[in-house]
Amino acid sequence: MTTATFDSYRMPADWRDFIALTKPRVMTLVVFTGLCGLLAAPGGIHPVLAFTTILCIAIGAGAAAALNQWYEADIDAKMKRTANRPLPAGRMDRQSALHFGVGLSFFSVVLLGVATNWLAAAVLAASILFYVIVYTIWLKPRTAQNIVIGGAAGAFPPVIGWAAVTGDIGALPVALFMLTFFWTPPHFWSLALFVKTDYAAAGIPMLPVVSGEVTTRRQIWLYTAIMAVAAMAPVLLQLTGLIYGLTALLGTALFVLFAFQVYRHRESDQSRMGPERRLFKYSILYLFLLFGAVVVDRWVLA
Amino acid sequence: MTPEEEQQIRARQKSRSLVTGLILALLVILFFAITMAKIGVSDAI
């Protein structure tokens, strides 16, 4: 269709593009960590309300993703990885994305408040605002430490899940928040090492672009050290038992080993970034493993 | 606007309406279940 760009504002966007706008694949991780926070919390919650909580976390994450793409449409257009998203590809107008994102945000927060409690809803609202305003609008285009602070947005789900059950925020969800928070830099920067050219083209100050690849490797190593402390904190503070303790010990040891290999590696050719790809892939498995272990641990001990 | 374009727009609108209707129907069921859970009539839901 040669008139696509001229006529696209009249053509209603396909409903599938609204689904794509919510980044369903990224959602799986926050749904999982949210579910673990909910399952690890003491006391019970009605299964329908548990389902609603997870649904609200998923919708909230989708809303944040939609608002992120509404704001970054021009940046996404410059990167190969994101150029085919609904907005940069011209399949949807920006205002639809904005309305969709704002609508979903309000809906998820109000539904969570009505179904469970307003503390959980407030944390969900804070996480959406944090992702959109603090990360997307404020920090991402300004500082190379953007994803460190931005990672906090992704660390909220276990706190929301826990608060939905108990109505408060305990030490364990805070520990899980810290784990996810310090896990984000090594996870994301290992990816940024092997997709560097894309971020450079879009003018996003990712650490490898601004400070170079060697600094990025050192920072990955430093944040991994802090993450290792955060990973062991739940068992050292006796918030969990030995099932989590052993899983965390072995899982973190492997993470530290992979991060050390990335730290020592000297390579700028992106086709030869073996250790970096390995750390990135393992980091996802690692988070699933540790959160799963928290739940198993709490259920076996209970 | 050519007839083909209009036809295409109508098809998009129809599929969007169907999906919206389906989501609304699911929300009716969800809100009913939440209400039942909140007033504690049944733990079987």
Image: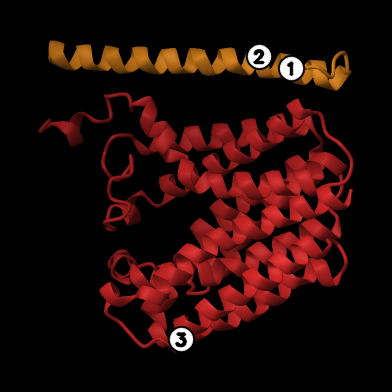
Camera sees residue A149: yes
**Where's the C terminus of chain B, which quadrant?**
top right
- Say the numbered circle drawn on residue B33: 1
The three-letter code of the residue at mark 3 reads Thr
Q: Quadrant of residue A184?
A: bottom right
Camera sees residue A212: no
Q: Which residue is mark 3?
A: A215
Question: Which hue is chain A drawn in?
Answer: red
> Residue at image x 45%, y 89%?
A264
Q: Secondary structure at mark 3?
A: helix
Give the letter of the chain under mark 1.
B
**Residue A183, image x, y percentages:** 60, 67
**Residue A251, image x, y percentages:** 63, 69
**Residue B11, image x, y percentages:** 28, 13
Q: Are marks 2 and 1 in contact (CB under 8 Å)?
A: yes
Between A255 and A155, which is closer to the camera in this rendering? A255
The three-letter code of the residue at mark 2 reads Ile
**Which chain is tinted orange?**
B
Up the image or down, A128 lies above or below A138; here it is: above
The three-letter code of the residue at mark 1 reads Ala
Same-chain check, marks 3 and 1: no
> Residue at image x 19%, y 36%?
A5
The residues tagged by marks 3 and 1 sit, at their Cα atoms, a distance apart of 53 Å
